[in-house]
Image: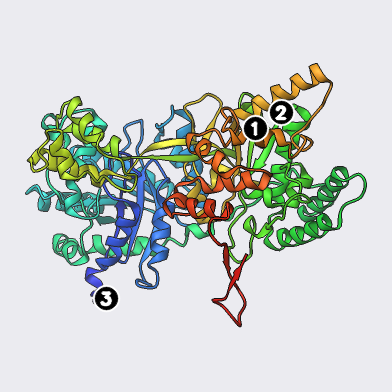
Amino acid sequence: MPVPPLPAATSYAELLAATNFSFLRGASHPFEMVGMAAGLGLTGIGICDRNSLSGVVRAFAAARDQAKEFPNFRHVTGSRLVFADGTPDVAVYPTDRSAYGRLSALLTLGNRRAPKGECHLERRDLVTHIDGQLLIVVPRDEQVEDDLLVAAALAKSAPGRVWVAATYRYDGQDTARLNRLAAGCRAHELPMLASMDPLYHEPRRRMVQDVLTCIREHVKIDEAGFLLAPHAYRHIHDPYDMASLFRDHPEALAETNRFLSLISFNLDELKYIYPEETVGNGETAQQTLERLSYEGARSRYPGGIPGKVEKGLAHELALIGEMGYAPYFLTVQDIVRFARQERGILCQGRGSAANSAVCFCLGITEVDPMLVDLLFERFVSTERDEPPDIDVDFEHERREEVMQYIYQKYGRHRAGLTANVITYRAKGAIRDVGKVFGMSDDTIGMISGLNWGWGSIDIPEDRMRQIGIDPEDHLIRMVMTIANELYGFPRHIGQHVGGFVITRDRLDHLVPISNAAMEDRTVIEWNKDDLDELGILKVDVLALGMLSCIRRAFNLMRQHYGQSLTLATVPQEDPRVYRMTHRADTIGVFQIESRAQMSMLPRLKPSEFYDLVIEVAIVRPGPIQGDMVHPYLKRRQGLEPTSYPSCSPSAPMAQIQG
């Protein structure tokens, strides 16, 4: 329903909102916080998670998705800094792109000083990165006077850009406390800003927040005591409620909108800029790519480039040039060149990158476009406007050499592994919530063992009764309800198996960088989906054990038979290989060694490479659940007629019998 217009006195923006990316603290997703704030009629919301920018992209996407419905609503990006030197918490909001870069660099500084998952910052670090930032000091109840002195000191470094947060506690002391805080702000000439300091979007999430607190503090719910919030009012309030709560301090509400008006920065200003190291002297990236592609084509086809390949190269290069992706291809080519030529590491591009004559000529893949019909638009398309995603597998025992080459070539300030946001799945949610409520390990194990789904925690009540658990029991219902709420919540940040983001300028001015658990690795805070949302490209440097096996096989053949083979020169279409697959004798054969594949092989009876392509593609959950397997086999064996729907405009439903 449309929100009625608000009088100026009740207009309000929430600027201290934490999400579940304040790990094990916030109890709502970013999209829930943004959606609730917009729906309640707030003028805007500031997402400021604890020492992190890991959830801001999702909040930005949520605000953009509802822009048509709430055109005047704003989302602003910030972070709540928690210090190691006794300084009170400070929410920091950049006003422009340069200030955002300084905030990201500040968080990187704190992260790199600390072990994985921690951030060590001091007040002096904030002062050195303070240009262009708006600050909200969050005073602690027990030392308000001292924290006001800190705010006043910060205001000397950032005049006119420091506020003091005023929150309503519902403890019977709010009137006196707010009056004292207002007097202290006037004495130090600091503006007071109203906030509910919310941890969740609606009151009922208070139970989830209590459980998260217990998980974080490693205590049971009946032992938590004052660790838990005293009430359920840490949610987003509508402007009318806030006007009532702060009726004696309306200026504190007005300051939220003044604060919002001073911020011009939006995440869509973040533009990914490719590195330049791989571009030839005096050339554009497109010119370098075209030169290397045709040099590679002449090397691949010493007798002359076939017309089919030349036509494919021209088409692909034109499309790459139109989309501006040449530097990306050059970056991947350089990594493959290092691995193959300088270190002799076996590597192979896979996925949709195999649908590319350019990738073949650059040496990224070994799929000869002369042997297959390639559809490059599956890989790069102007209609989809999606960035390319080239996955390259390397020998698993030597992949680290390639990763360290990337760090050395570009520097850790310009290269980092993509994050993998570890979220709660069914078993983990049931286990952690069950422990908080004091359930025995046996009971937790029996309940979690009944869950087989991936989309939610859905255990039929009759199944629970069969193992002796009463689903109507209050404790059981509580555990299952909260576990369902917790499902999909971020648990912590891990590292992607090999996705690298490499930039021309400083990566730590784009996204904060942290130490990984593994030595000599660094990780950014955003995962693949976040990068895609902002149009930031990554290069997947993956490890594959089968390539190590193939390397050993090549070495043995060279030692014992004098044959030097590469992935591109392995003899094709050996009938003995296909006879082996008919017997399902494929243990150790990459991609067709699973039980499902071995069951399918004797029925499919592959006789050429494309049959194996079908084999690998059709033995997947989607085709199996869609009942595609048995009809395909029957038609292949001639037991059913084969028909194809025609695309002819004159007869759209015509069937061509084949």
Depth order, front residue of 65/357: 357
Mark on residue 2? 3
Circles 1, 2 touching at the beta carbon (< 8 Å): yes
Mark on residue 394? 1
The answer to whether any part of residue 97 appears in the image is no
649 is higher (above) or lower (below) than 463 = below
Distance in Å between CA atoms under marks 3 and 1 = 55 Å
Q: Residue 202's x, y, as percent?
A: 20, 55
Residue placed at 62% from the left, 57% from the top?
Answer: 378
Residue placed at 29% from the left, 44% from the top?
Answer: 487
361 is higher (above) or lower (below) than 33 = above
Front position among marks 3 and 1: 1
2 is higher (above) or lower (below) than 440 = below
In the image, taking residue 77 as reference, residue 430 lies left or right, namely: left
- Characterize the local packing of mark 3: few (<14), some (14-19) or many (20 or more) Cα atoms within 10 angstroms: few
Who comes first in sequence, dot 3 or dot 1? 3
Circles 3, 2 touching at the beta carbon (< 8 Å): no
Q: Quadrant of the C terminus?
A: bottom right
